[in-house]
Image (cartoon, helix red, strand yellow):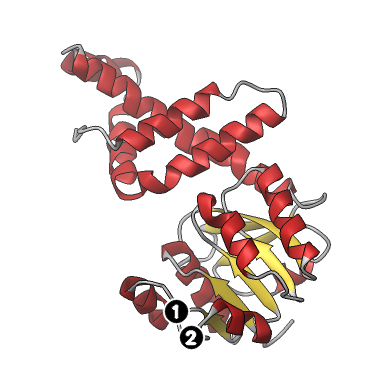
Amino acid sequence: MSDVVVGLLHPGEMGAAVGRCLTGRGHPVAWAAAGRSPGTAARAAEAGLSDAGTVASLTKNAEVILSVCPPHAALEVARSVVGFGGIFVDANAVSPETAREVGRIVTGGGASFVDGGIIGPPPLASGDTRLYLSGEHAREVGELFSGTAVDARVVAGSPGAASAVKMAYAGWTKGTAALILAVRELARAERVEDVLLSEWALSQPDLEARSVGAARSSAAKGWRWVGEMEEIAASMAADGLPDGFHQAAAEIFRRGPGSATG
């Protein structure tokens, strides 16, 4: 799949970096500036994306559309491209059932559907970022990223499988970040934080640094993680597992980061 025209909705930090990988490989990548912020426009320009103006215009020319947006917007983005006849890739942090609902929306309008999940930071260096893909056309989509900083990997199974990988992975990484923020806040509220930090230094020497890192990441990105934790909770509940862990994690991120600074 060389020189495939790709539509990208909508280039935030992650989406723009993924788009840059595609343009670097020679694929024309378009986005829709209508209703988007100057910051988004600046990211798109830096990534070499062309402006199609509107989503409707983008759908007419793209062969593949890649959705990279906050989880709460995944269904809205899918509805915005109904009538598109190419391959729609949802690469958002959503539950398997939400991914399948996205698939029902876009295939009902004539598209093919590939489920995706991104693990890692915005791709800069090879080996840092994986894009897991599932569905009939997953391998074709993966080939778009051959030779780029995105390591595209096909997951056996139907759409929903790639999202399940993302949910399970983030359930640990971001779930434990929320937990460590909560326990440090508890110690602070009870005025024993200095004792806790001393005990961590003795028995869990990596935890203070992890708590500082969690607070820093939450300050920058926690607002986006609320929806992700809710999607993980929904994934757990759908499989008969307790969803309270990640509902609580969503509440921690909803409240904002603690003031831990080390």
Where, by quadrant of the figure, is residue 146 drawn? bottom right
Q: 224 or 56: nearer the eye?
A: 56
Numbered mark located on residue 58 in the image: none
* Horizontal relation, residue 117 to residue 87: left or right: left
Image coordinates for residue 220, horizontal then vertical, percent: 31, 50
Left or right: 122 in relation to 218: right
Which residue is drawn at the image coordinates 37% and 36% (left, top)?
253
Residue placed most toward the observer, 127 or 65: 65
- Is residue 50 positioned above or below 68 on the image? below
Q: Left or right of 185: which side holds 223?
A: right
The residue shown at (42%, 48%) is 224
Q: Position of residue 13 (x, y in %)?
A: 41, 64
Label 2 sits on a secondary structure element that is: strand
Q: Can residue 63 be seen in the rendering of this structure?
A: yes
* Foreground pick, 99 / 138: 99
Residue type pointed to by label 1: Ala
Instruction: Classify 10 Å Cα crowding around label 2: few (below 14), some (14-19), many (20 and above).
Output: some
Give residue 51's mark.
2
In the picture, the quarter occupied by the N terminus is bottom right
Please give the name of the residue rendered at 70% of the width and 43% of the height, measured from the top-left corner. Answer: 97
Instruction: Check if mark 2's residue and mark 1's residue have beta carbons within 8 Å.
Output: yes
For numbered disc 1, what is the local secondary structure?
A: loop
Q: Which residue is mark 1?
A: 33
Q: Is residue 243 above or below residue 66?
A: above
Residue 257 appears left or right of 63: left
Give the CA separation, mark 2 to mark 1: 6 Å
The percent coordinates of residue 70 (x first, y second) are 49, 54
